[in-house]
Image (cartoon, helix red, strand yellow):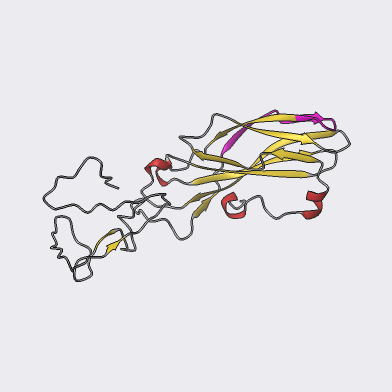
């Protein structure tokens, strides 16, 4: 089972092969987004920059599915669970020839691993392998995508087996419970513990009076 591309990228760089490369592939990597926003297909361009005829074969090699969450816990795991669940990739064409200076567009269609649990937002990945059967050189294009809808990711940790969650602490240093009221004076302060599981560009904490009705604009997450 290959390590996830989010862990190893495209692998170690072979400097000699890079300097003597006769093939250029663009783009050099594919970010597929989540399955809701994933495109129907992706294109890569293979170009022969050598001085000899090249016979190419395009194939796919899946890498480990990385699941970083578990049910009932908003916090991400310190170490993801890796499983041998791979995406299906349709490649067209899979075999072709290019004379020096020629290029060819390859169309790729991705289907997420069937056993992946979308609610846990696991990351699938792998490599598109471009083999030149004339000189034996192989180039790899890493790809990665998320199974599920990233919009549903719970940013703030409200449930966690560690007990460390987002909340407001009372005077004794304990989390307040639902329905509990606190009197805040001008000189007083109550710490807000802010624990995030996923990255967010903006987090807003609203402080409202206990007598106010919660506005629709407030985010319950």
Seen as rendered, the residue at the extreme front is: 186
Q: Residue at x 58, y 36 (%)?
A: 88
Query: Residue 179: horizontal and vertical position, in percent?
Result: 14, 55
Q: In the displayed structure, does residue 207 sit left or right of residue 15?
A: left
Q: Answer with the quarter of the image where residue 24 lies.
A: top right
Q: In the displayed structure, does residue 218 sit left or right of residue 210?
A: right
Query: Residue 178: horizontal and vertical position, in percent?
Result: 17, 55
Q: Who is closer to the viewer here, 4 or 199?
A: 199
Q: In the displayed structure, does residue 143 sit left or right of residue 211?
A: right
Q: Residue at x 73, y 35 (%)?
A: 46
Seen as rendered, the residue at the extreme left is: 211
The boundaries of the magenta stretch are 87-103
Is residue 58 highlighted in magenta?
A: no
Q: Who is closer to the viewer here, 82 or 50?
A: 50
93 is higher (above) or lower (below) than 127: above
101 is higher (above) or lower (below) than 82: above
Q: Residue at x 30, y 48 (%)?
A: 221
């Amino acid at each position: 089972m290959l390590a996830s591309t989010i862990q190893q990228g495209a692998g170690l760089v072979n400097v000699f092969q890079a300097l003597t490369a006769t093939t250029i592939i663009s783009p050099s990597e594919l970010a597929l987004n989540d399955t809701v926003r994933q495109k129907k297909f992706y294109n890569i361009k293979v170009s022969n920059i050598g001085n000899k005829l090249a016979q190419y074969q395009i194939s796919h090699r899946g890498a480990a599915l990385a699941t970083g969450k578990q049910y009932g816990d908003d916090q991400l795991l310190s170490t993801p669970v890796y499983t041998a669940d791979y995406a299906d990739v349709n490649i067209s064409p899979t075999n072709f020839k290019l004379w020096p200076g020629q290029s060819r567009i390859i169309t790729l269609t991705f289907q997420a691993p069937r056993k992946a649990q979308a609610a846990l937002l696991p990351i699938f990945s792998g490599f598109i392998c471009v083999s030149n059967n004339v000189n034996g050189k192989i180039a790899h294009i890493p790809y990665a995508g998320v199974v599920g809808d990233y919009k549903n990711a719970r940013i703030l940790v409200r449930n966690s087996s560690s007990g460390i969650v987002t909340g407001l602490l009372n005077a004794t240093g304990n989390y307040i419970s639902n329905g509990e009221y606190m009197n805040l004076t001008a000189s007083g302060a109550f710490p807000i513990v802010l624990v995030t599981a996923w990255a967010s560009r903006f987090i807003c904490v609203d402080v409202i009076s206990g007598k106010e009705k919660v506005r629709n604009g407030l985010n319950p997450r």
